[in-house]
Amino acid sequence: MLGVLIFFALGIGLGSLLKPGKGKLKLTGRISMYAVYLLLFILGVSVGANPEILSTIDTLGLKAFVISGLSLAGTLFATWIYTQFIQKLKKSKLQE
């Protein structure tokens, strides 16, 4: 965990040294996306190499599908609540 925090702090330091610019932001976005792709690929390789996980993938897949579906439903519900109530409250305060 300490290593993660150190790398995070180093990234913040490097980012603060770079002058803001549209091209640099696009570059860091691309690098981040490719890093995520690489991590997902490595995760897939490790899952594929683990016979224990492969033998229970049907059960794990169903649980993961249910958890992600419920997470999505909860997020959509919270977003709906936010837009219905809080945004209306902000609009009414701005009109006063």
Image: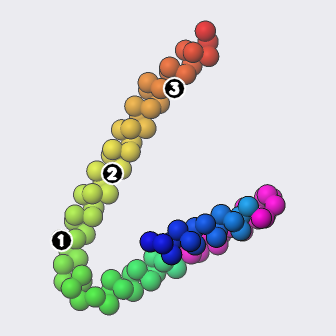
- Residue type of the residue flagged with mark 1: Thr
**Residue occupying image coordinates x 47% and y 26%:** 86
Task: Say the numbered circle drawn on residue 71.
Answer: 2
* Residue 33 visible to an observer of this rendering: no
- Going by the image, does 53 lie left or right of 86? left
Task: Say the numbered circle drawn on residue 87.
Answer: 3
**Residue occupying image coordinates x 32% and y 90%:** 49
**In the rendered view, would you say 92 is above or below 16?**
above
Which structural element holds mark 1?
helix
Q: Which residue is mark 1?
A: 59
Which structural element holds mark 3?
helix
In the current view of this chain or complex, which residue is farthest to the top? Answer: 96
Q: How many marks?
A: 3
Q: Residues within 10 Å of mark 2 (few under 14, many from 20)?
A: few
What kind of secondary structure does the magenta stretch mostly adopt?
helix
**The magenta stretch spans residue 73:** no
Task: Say the numbered circle drawn on residue 23.
Answer: none
**Residue occupying image coordinates x 40% and y 80%:** 43
Residue 80 placed where, x, y %? 41, 34
Which sits earlier in the primary sequence, circle 1 or circle 2?
1
Q: Which region shows up in magenta?
A: 17-36
- Going by the image, does 63 lie left or right of 77? left
**The magenta stretch spans residue 26:** yes
Cα separation between marks 3 and 1: 41 Å
Residue 10 placed where, x, y %? 64, 70
Which sits earlier in the primary sequence, circle 3 or circle 1?
1
Residue 46 placed where, x, y %? 36, 86
Image quadrant occupied by the C terminus: top right
- Residue type of the residue flagged with mark 3: Gln
- Going by the image, does 63 lie left or right of 80? left
